[in-house]
């Protein structure tokens, strides 16, 4: 019989997945909100915001990729340009692809994280000045920060 | 030796998303310090005003505090408790809202000071989840509404006749969207 031992990392993974597609304490999860959005709203440009909802979704995927690269010890990986952060036009026009990329990247990140133990959390992120505890919790908060923005852009 | 590593880590995250130094971007105080009355009162469609959101964030922080103190009955079950009954936002009202918000941070930190990691696994009185879920939830709830505040400020600024009437003097050289 396989017993799942709860660790700090397993709680972070659980928290990350709950905020992404579970019954999150704070309110709507990322996928709950994205799946409820009318497709026409995705690319709508609001004069008051530099980014559309589609760009915010791309951004959530981009930072999952960032974490994956750092877990693979890629010391040089950075999201520097607007295109790397918010996507090019062709990255954004296909809503189904945009959502699938986010889901696939999320899944790949969880799978990768499950290969580590708690010793990961105090390790310094390659090329950065902070540890993986801060990065992984930061990613969860980054999701909710942009989710709040997406909600206002939707209204 | 007392085991409180996880609790201390949660407190650190709570402080960072509230005061500053968070990985995801600007903290709640960084986005609300120097907030002008016009921005705080700005209303668009069914979006809550920033003043209402500040009240709402504080309400749920007080909910957490009540639960830490063992109150099984306390609940936020009506609109007034949830978002307040703010008829008019003026300097006085905004200052009171910000004061309540910052007090909630001090009170939460003080209430958690004496707790350890075992406390995180206790079930919240009157609820069916643990304090670990509640405290992480409070942080995410703060950040979710901080994201809303960041963009409502931009919306308010775009609708203002004079941009500098509503934009916070704090962080005005940075774009909170970018994080």
Image: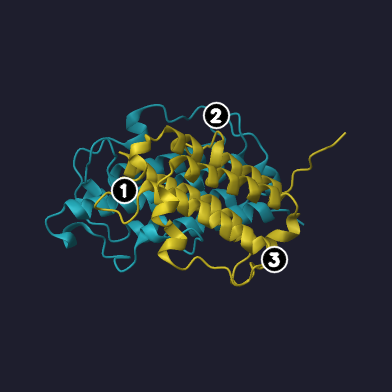
Q: Which residue is mark 3?
A: A123
Rendered location of residue B129, percent (x, y): 61, 33
Front residue of A57/B76: it is A57
Q: CA distance from mark 1 to mark 3?
A: 40 Å
Q: Is residue A81 visible?
A: yes
For label 3, the crowd category at 10 Å Cα-Cα, with few meaning under 14, some 14 to 19 and many 20 or more, is few
Q: Which residue is mark 1?
A: B97
Q: Secondary structure at mark 3?
A: loop
Q: Secondary structure at mark 1?
A: helix
Q: Residue at x 54, y 47 (%)?
A: A101
Q: CA distance from mark 3 to mark 2?
A: 39 Å
Q: CA distance from mark 1 to mark 2?
A: 26 Å
Rendered location of residue B142, percent (x, y): 44, 48
Front residue of A83/A49: it is A83
Marked residue chain, label 3: A
Q: Is residue B91 visible?
A: no
Rendered location of residue A96, percent (x, y): 47, 40
Q: Secondary structure at mark 2?
A: loop
Shown in yellow, the chain is A
Colour assigned to chain B in the rendering is cyan
Looking at the rendered image, the disc whose residue lies closer to the viewer, 3 or 2, is 3
For label 1, the crowd category at 10 Å Cα-Cα, with few meaning under 14, some 14 to 19 and many 20 or more, is some
Is there CB contact under 8 Å for labels 1 and 3? no
Q: Which residue is mark 2?
A: B72
Is there CB contact under 8 Å for labels 3 and 2? no
């Amino acid at each position: 019989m396989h017993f799942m031992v709860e660790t700090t990392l397993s709680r972070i993974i659980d928290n990350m997945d709950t905020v992404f597609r579970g019954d999150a304490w704070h309110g709507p999860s990322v996928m709950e909100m994205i799946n409820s959005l009318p497709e026409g709203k995705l690319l709508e440009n609001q004069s008051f915001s530099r980014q559309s909802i589609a760009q915010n979704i791309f951004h959530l995927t981009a930072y999952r990729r960032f974490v994956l690269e750092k877990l693979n010890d890629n010391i040089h990986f950075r999201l520097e340009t607007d295109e790397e952060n918010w996507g090019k036009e062709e990255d954004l026009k296909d809503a189904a692809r945009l959502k699938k990329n986010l889901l696939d990247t999320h899944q790949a990140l969880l799978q990768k994280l499950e290969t580590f133990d708690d010793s990961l959390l105090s390790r310094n992120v390659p090329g950065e000045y902070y540890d993986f505890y801060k990065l992984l919790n930061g990613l969860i908060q980054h999701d909710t920060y942009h989710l709040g923005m997406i909600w206002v852009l939707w209204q | 030796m007392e085991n409180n590593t996880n609790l201390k880590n949660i407190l650190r995250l709570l402080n960072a998303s509230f005061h500053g130094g968070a990985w995801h971007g600007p903290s709640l105080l960084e986005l609300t310090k120097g907030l002008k009355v016009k921005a705080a009162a700005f209303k668009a469609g069914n979006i809550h005003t920033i003043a209402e959101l500040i009240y709402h964030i504080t309400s749920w922080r007080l909910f957490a505090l009540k639960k830490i103190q063992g109150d099984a009955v306390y609940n936020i079950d009506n609109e007034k408790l949830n978002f307040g009954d703010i008829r008019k936002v003026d300097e006085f009202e905004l200052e009171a809202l910000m004061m309540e918000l910052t007090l909630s941070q001090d009170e939460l930190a003080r209430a958690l000071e004496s707790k350890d990691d075992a406390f995180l696994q206790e079930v919240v009185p009157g609820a069916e989840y643990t304090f670990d879920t509640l405290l992480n939830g409070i942080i995410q709830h703060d950040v979710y509404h901080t994201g809303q505040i960041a963009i409502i400020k931009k919306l308010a600024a775009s609708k203002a006749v004079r941009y500098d009437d509503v934009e916070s003097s704090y962080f005005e050289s940075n774009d909170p969207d970018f994080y």
